[in-house]
Amino acid sequence: MSENEIAKELLPLLRVYKDGRVDRLMGEDIVPPGDPKGVVLSKDVLYSPEANLSSRLYLPKNTNPGQKLPLLIYIHGGGFCIESAFSPTYHNHLNFLVPEANVIAVSVEYRRAPENILPAAYDDSWAAIKWAASHVNGNGPEEWLNSHADFDKVFVAGDSAGANITHQMGLRLAQEKLVGFHVQGLVLVHPYFWGVDRIGKEPEESVPKTITEGLWNVASPGSGFDDPLFNPVLDPKFAALGSARLLVFVAGNDILRDRGWLCFEELEKRGWKGKVEIMESEGEDHVFHLFNPTSENANRMLQKFVSFFNIQA
């Protein structure tokens, strides 16, 4: 076998070789904590010594001693394969979001495929949530969370694959109660859901479809596109979420748009007791707000985020 023999190529994202090596062609840059505008404090904190995984914490700089803020657990996207909590894309996003929403945030780093196939990303994200919950009595290992996190106002959010993970975290929160850790809402931004059968305006063949399916095959080999982790409406527990509210964002030009709408519609049909909302950004592509955060539609998303965090269930 040639050391350069390619097993799977998903341009422009990554290339996987038959000997197991991976070339990530995007989302590999990392930046240190910090905020050029000087309005957000951030630092990296180890949450899983076993897996040597850290999260990046964010706190508005003008927070007073002892002031309590809603806690946001944020889970990044990247098809389970690329990007990072420490990438410029997500560091900039949290620096932008945290002061606007006036929250303290934990941006979760998790193990990526194909080196660590699913359920690694789910397990790591759950470990990060439990680590955050270990601070509810004010005696956890991280002083920012002890001093400033309001555990009566917890939110879990993510985009793309991070939104997929967020939905799974909502199910786990319902099954495994974390005492004193009260999740008020979940936010799914352009969720990475799919299925075998085409729905709505999903194309039979296209480059975005090839990438959508190819990334899942890398992250969860052999499980198929109707795996309830990828097509969650097939999960009998789909609507058993451990939160009072859910907000879904979709983008009009995103191949994943119809899956976000299906999630919204199915929760309503199945009589979920919580409140579900959806917001569509017409004419926009997948996670456009990460790359053009000052656009009009990105600003509308931001304001919806902010209002969601500040309304009680």
Image (cartoon, grey):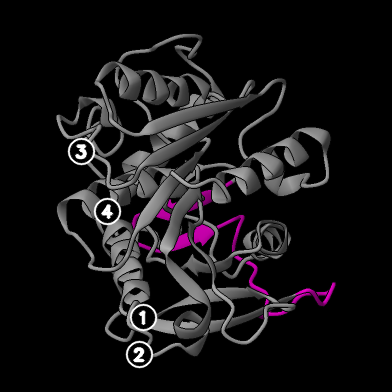
Q: Which residue is drawn at 59% across and 78% down?
A: 67
Image coords of residue 213 (percent x, y): 39, 32
Residues at marks 3 and 4, CA–CA distance in whole angstroms: 10 Å
User: Tags 2 and 1 in contact by the CB under 8 Å rule?
Assistant: yes
- Given the image, on which type of amino acid does mark 1 rest? His
Q: Mark 4 points at which residue?
A: 118
Residue 45 in view (yes/no): yes
Q: Earlier in the sequence, mark 4 or mark 2?
A: 4
Residues shaded magenta = 13-39
Q: Please, what secondary structure does the residue beneath circle 1 have?
A: loop
- Given the image, on which type of amino acid does mark 2 rest? Asn
Residue 139: numbered disc: 2
Residue 223: numbered disc: 3
Q: Please, what secondary structure does the residue beneath circle 3 have?
A: loop
Callout in the foreground (4, 1)? 1
Residues at marks 2 and 1, CA–CA distance in whole angstroms: 6 Å
Who is closer to the viewer here, 277 or 1? 277
Q: Earlier in the sequence, mark 4 or mark 1?
A: 4
210 on left or right of 302: left
Residues at marks 4 and 1, CA–CA distance in whole angstroms: 27 Å
User: Tags 3 and 4 in contact by the CB under 8 Å rule?
Assistant: yes
Please identify the quadrant where the N terminus is shown. Answer: bottom left
Residues at marks 2 and 3, CA–CA distance in whole angstroms: 41 Å
Q: Which of marks 1 and 3 is nearer the N terminus?
A: 1
Q: Earlier in the sequence, mark 3 or mark 4?
A: 4
Image coords of residue 160 (percent x, y): 49, 42
